[in-house]
Amino acid sequence: MRDLDVGHGIVVPAASLRATTSRSGGPGGQNVNKLETKVTIEADVDSLPLTEVQKQLVRERLQGRISRAGVLRVTSQAERTQLANRDRALSRMEELLYEALEVRAVRKKSRTPKSQKQRRLENKKRRAETKRLRSRLE
């Protein structure tokens, strides 16, 4: 297994990752029944070479993929070979960690322009008038 380069000058050593294999589902003929091609890569978030702030970011942004024990898990079974699935899972984990550690720009609040509010109200009035004219008169 290879080290993960998650950008920002951070490299996750291969020693802190665990890979397990199991039988994959889906099409593949006899291959499915006898070979373990599904690969699951696991990494303990606490053992990653990150600062506490970065670890907290990872926990928040990837909470759906992290177990209660604090283990980040990525699975791949799309390929027919174990090696291809392992490479795919490692790339996906690298991508997830990179995106989780990315510093996002803070959105600046802005007000809706007065002209836009005015245009919206005029459109509402025009629409209401159209509907009023369609109704039958008594």
Image (spheres, rainbow, N blue to C red):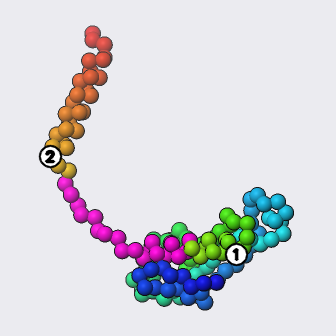
Residue 105 inside the magenta-drawn segment: yes
Rendered position, 67 above or below 1: above
Check disc 1: other Cα within 10 Å, few if <14, some if 14-19, many if 20+. Answer: some
Instruction: Point out the image quarter for the N terminus.
Output: bottom right
Going by the numbered disc 2, the residue's amino acid type is Lys
**Range shown magenta:** 92-111
Q: SS class of the residue under badge 1? A: helix
Residue 34 placement (x, y as % from top left): 84, 69
Q: Quadrant of residue 14?
A: bottom right
Residue 57 placement (x, y as % from top left): 42, 77
Would residue 124 be found to the left or right of residue 94 on screen? left
Residue 132 placement (x, y as % from top left): 26, 21
Q: Which residue is mark 1?
A: 83
Going by the numbered disc 1, the residue's amino acid type is Leu
Would residue 27 be found to the left or right of residue 15 on screen? right
Depth check, front residue: 105 or 46: 105
Residue 59 placement (x, y as % from top left): 47, 76
Instruction: Point out the image quarter for the C terminus.
Output: top left
Q: Quadrant of residue 120?
A: top left
Q: How many marks?
A: 2
Q: Nearer the viewer, mark 2 or mark 1?
A: 1
Q: Earlier in the sequence, mark 2 or mark 1?
A: 1
Residue depicted at 56% across the width and 85% down the height: 3
Residue depicted at 85% across the width and 63% down the height: 30
